[in-house]
Image: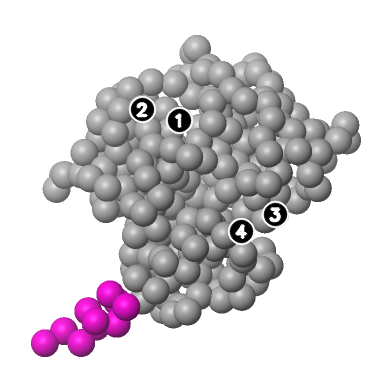
């Protein structure tokens, strides 16, 4: 008899219920009622939360270094926005701005036994976009919990704002992409690349083969953001953020 299953069922149910309730009530948690002890438990919680929140239409994926195991979280339709310049601050507990690079798929990459190759994954990409992710938390304080608890909490996702498509996206080298970020008119980031994970296509391939399996793989139209190029910049409501990607365009956002 597997004595782990009752604990996992209880953990997922109680933690997911608490996280969804915190979102709906706007009352942050001091901690989860039952904390995940492994990455598998954290992913089980975030999967259950995502299923309760509605359709999954996007993903976030990242890694702390070029050789590190990636991590991911599904993003629901309710927090995915295309070419908007304003969002209400009431959506968020905290506002952590990150400038990122997004890939949008033009065809399915369903879960399968044979791993998708890098070339197959790139062939499924329809477009590349500049983007902002707003990092947020369902806990009282951002970063206050064990990393597994934050992974369970949609890996600190708040919203994904996607800019215009880049026409010749295959000519873009994200590792060498110049990027600046201005907040409230002040230059706060000026980098080349800037993503701690290095090559974002490695992350996209891992997501297609591993991270997206609970949802049957990736699907045409899915939007994947591949990690921060700027770090997380916490801002007060009313702050205007402008990210400029040399040769790719500019994305602007005010959370007010």
Tell me the residue that label 1 is attached to: 103
Query: Is 188 placed above or below 141 here?
Result: above
Label 2: state its secondary structure.
loop
Is 100 left, or right, of 233 in this rendering?
Answer: left
Tell me how the rendering is colored.
one colour
Q: Quadrant of residue 29?
A: bottom right
Seen from the viewer's position, the closer of residues 108 and 78 is 78
Within 10 Å of disc 3 (Cα), the crowding (few <14, some 14-19, many 20+) is: many
Q: Is residue 225 above or below residue 162?
A: below
Q: Residues within 10 Å of mark 1 (few under 14, many from 20)?
A: many
Mark before the other along the chain sequence, 4 or 2? 4
Residue at the spot of label 3: 94
Residues at discs 3 and 4 in contact (Cβ within 8 Å): no
Question: Which residue sits at x=40%, y=50%?
Answer: 53
Q: Reading the chain from its start, which is encountered first: label 3 or label 1?
A: 3
Q: Which sits earlier in the primary sequence, circle 2 or circle 3?
A: 3
Residue to which mark 2 is pinned:
221
Measuring from the top left, give residue 107's x and y in whole percent: 27, 25
Q: Secondary structure at mark 3?
A: loop
Residue 21 in the image: x percent, y percent?
49, 63
Q: Which residue is mark 4?
A: 26
Nearest-to-viewer mark from 3 and 1: 3
At x 75%, y 51%, the residue is 234
Q: Main secondary structure of the magenta part?
A: helix
Q: Quadrant of the C terminus?
A: top right
State how far apart marks 2 and 3 are (Cα): 29 Å
The residue lying toward the viewer, choosing from 147 and 67, is: 147
Q: Which residues are magenta?
A: 1-10
- Residue at image location 56% in from the left, 19% down from the top: 164
Discs 2/3, front? 3
Quadrant location of the N terminus in the rendered image: bottom left
């Amino acid at each position: 008899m597997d004595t782990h299953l009752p604990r996992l069922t209880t953990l997922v149910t109680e933690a997911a219920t608490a996280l969804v309730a915190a979102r709906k009530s706007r009352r942050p948690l001091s901690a989860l009622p039952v904390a995940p002890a492994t990455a598998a438990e954290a992913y089980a919680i975030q999967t259950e939360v995502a299923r309760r929140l509605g359709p999954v239409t996007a993903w976030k994926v990242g890694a702390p270094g070029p050789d590190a195991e990636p991590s991911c979280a599904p993003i629901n339709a309710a927090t995915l926005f295309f070419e908007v310049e304003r969002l209400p601050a009431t959506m968020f507990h905290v506002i952590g701005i990150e400038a990122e690079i997004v890939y949008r798929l033009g065809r399915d990459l369903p879960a399968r036994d044979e791993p998708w190759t890098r070339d197959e994954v790139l062939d499924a990409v329809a477009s590349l976009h500049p983007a902002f992710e707003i990092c947020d938390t369902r806990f009282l304080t951002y970063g206050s919990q064990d990393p597994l608890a934050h992974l369970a909490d949609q890996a600190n996702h708040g919203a994904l704002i996607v800019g215009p498509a880049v026409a010749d996206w295959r000519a873009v080298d994200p590792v060498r992409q110049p990027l600046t970020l201005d907040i409230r008119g002040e230059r706060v980031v000026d980098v080349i690349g800037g993503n701690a994970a290095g090559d974002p296509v490695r992350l996209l391939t891992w997501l297609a083969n591993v991270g997206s399996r609970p949802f049957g793989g990736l699907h045409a139209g899915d939007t994947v953001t591949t990690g921060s190029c700027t770090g997380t910049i916490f801002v007060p409501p009313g702050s205007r953020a402008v990210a400029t990607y040399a040769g790719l365009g500019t994305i602007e956002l005010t959370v007010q």
